[in-house]
Image: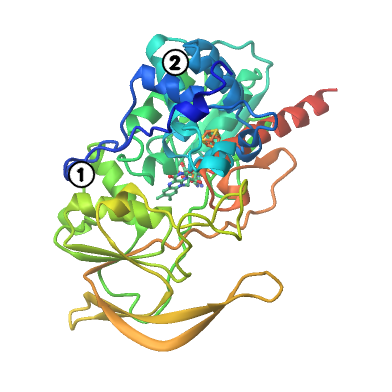
Amino acid sequence: MGNPKAFMTVPRLEAGHRPIHERICDFSEVEQTLSETERRNQASRCMDCGVPFCHWACPLGNRPPEWQDAVYRGDWEKAFKILSLTNDFPEFTGRICPALCEKSCVLNHCMDAPVTTRENECSIIEKAFAEGYIKPRTYERNGKRVAVIGAGPSGLSAAARLNCMGYEVTVYDKMNKSGGLVRYGIPNFKLDKFIINRRIKFMEDEGIHFINDCYIEPGTVPEGYDAYVVATGTPQARDLSIPGRELSGIYFALDMLTQQNEILEGVEFPADKLVNAKGKRVLVIGGGDTGSDCIGTCHRHEALEVTQIEIMPQPPQGHNPATPWPWWPQVMKTTTSHEEGCIRRWCLASNRFIGDSEGRLKGVEVERVEWAPSPDGGRPSMKPTGEKEIIECDMVLLAMGFLKPRQPDYPANVFLCGDAKNGASLVVRAIASGREVAVQVDSYLTSRQN
Ligand SMILES: Cc1cc2nc3c(=O)[nH]c(=O)nc-3n(C[C@H](O)[C@H](O)[C@H](O)COP(=O)(O)OP(=O)(O)OC[C@H]3O[C@@H](n4cnc5c(N)ncnc54)[C@H](O)[C@@H]3O)c2cc1C
Ligand code: SF4
């Protein structure tokens, strides 16, 4: 902790975002960067608390105080070395992690101005790539082979860890390129795909094999490996089975998001297969991150109007006494996509889709619902109120989450990780799960050897 008073004298400064009128005209990353001096000042705000709640909150157990101090002193290489001990892909989390660490930062508790830990993390890894602190290494092989099925962040982190331990690792994925939802779900304006390409190339240079366009039937595994990691995510989106579901103009969120990411990579789609919001009144059903990504994409398509509805009540603004510090606060979240313009409504259930005589969507009947708290503190119960209305729209995007997959019974040498194991979650949790499974695979294979 180089500057013990910085938390009192240096205000929190976020890098901010490109102006709205500029950024909605392209799909480039919206977040900006600080100068090196400003970044080091921000790192100096860390108080190096005796009990660092940021360690506790980060699913990876990242150690922000240690690397904040190195950044403050300008020792970026040391900062990178500390960061890389716990995080295999800081360039992902540094961009899209909701920063659980910042919510539990003591400076968040006492002055609503946590250290800019996520942004600092991103700066460290970008500096490491720019200055060549991060270099591919070769590892002594131990003669054992592991297959990883699924090249999302959990499979990739499992592969990276197992490779370091000396296993010969092959990663299979059904898609043309690796990255999972980070490539095919998350829009470029949150994370440019160059970031994933750079990491995959690095992993290849470290000796990991990638086999793409290869679907592995659930319950089966490719032959010839000593152990397997199944990291296949949550392939099935939650549907809305209400009358009118067959109308044209109703899509799953990923129909649009995946296609848009592929278009930006040069893939061409026939006009009748395009999921494009240009000139449309769009209704996004689902109030989470996926819905927000749909909103940002619709703006860039030049939608006429975007509305987002959520069945749950509007969360409180600012602080929520039900989720006090240092816990993750259940509060109203406004993303850059919301800032770009969107009507947001809560406590609305969807009753039926309404179409015209040619089977095209023209609206959704919604009904206001009330939520009563559960006496035992469990999930609140929902009550329809009978207050119905029609929201006119030409396009609906279903963004209501993903079903947790039911996994078949696998033999003892097959291990699950990431969303495939835990259900839909966060990139940081997927990476943590991949690291954990690598240790399990290693102890399984090592114990069999003895
Ligand atoms: C639109 C959207 C936005 C999100 N935004 C954020 C965010 O901002 N921040 C955040 O932290 N998290 C975000 N998430 C969540 C995050 O992307 C996931 O939690 C994370 O990617 C899960 O990683 P995973 O490796 O477990 O699974 P996935 O990323 O889903 O990867 C699974 C991989 O397995 C492959 N696969 C599946 N089945 C097979 C098969 N049978 N054979 C071969 N390969 C197969 C898939 O092609 C895929 O590459 C978002 C999710 C979505 C959908
Ligand atoms: S991975 Fe996320 S929670 Fe962990 S230190 Fe980085 S920003 Fe914070």
Residue 222 appears in the rendering: no
Q: Secondary structure at mark 2?
A: helix
Q: Which residue is mark 1?
A: 268
Residue 257 spot, x, y in % from top left: 32, 50
Residue 148 appears in the rendering: yes
Mark 1 to mark 2 CA distance (whole Å):
35 Å
**Residue visible at 69% across and 32% down in the picture:** 51
Q: Amino acid at mark 2?
A: Ala
Residue 86 spot, x, y in % from top left: 61, 26
Q: Quadrant of the C terminus?
A: top right
Q: Amino acid at mark 1?
A: Glu
Residue 329 spot, x, y in % from top left: 55, 52
Residue 189 spot, x, y in % from top left: 30, 40
Residue contact between numbered discs 1 and 2, judged by CB atoms under 8 Å: no
Residue 195 falls in image quadrant? top left
Q: Which mark is residue 333?
A: none
Disc 1 vs disc 2: which is toward the camera?
A: 2
Q: Quadrant of the N terminus?
A: top right
**Residue visible at 53% across and 15% down in the picture:** 70
Q: Secondary structure at mark 1?
A: loop
Q: Is residue 371 above or below residue 132?
A: below
Q: Which residue is mark 2?
A: 128
At label 2, counting other C-alpha atoms closer than 10 Å, the crowd grade (few under 14, some 14-19, many 20 or more) is some
Q: How is the image coloured?
A: rainbow
Give the camera-side residue of 135 and 34.
34
Q: Is residue 140 above or below residue 6?
A: above
Residue placed furthest toward the left: 279
Q: Which badge, 1 or 2, comes first in the chain's sequence?
A: 2
At label 1, counting other C-alpha atoms closer than 10 Å, the crowd grade (few under 14, some 14-19, many 20 or more) is few
Side of 71 where 143 appears, left or right: right
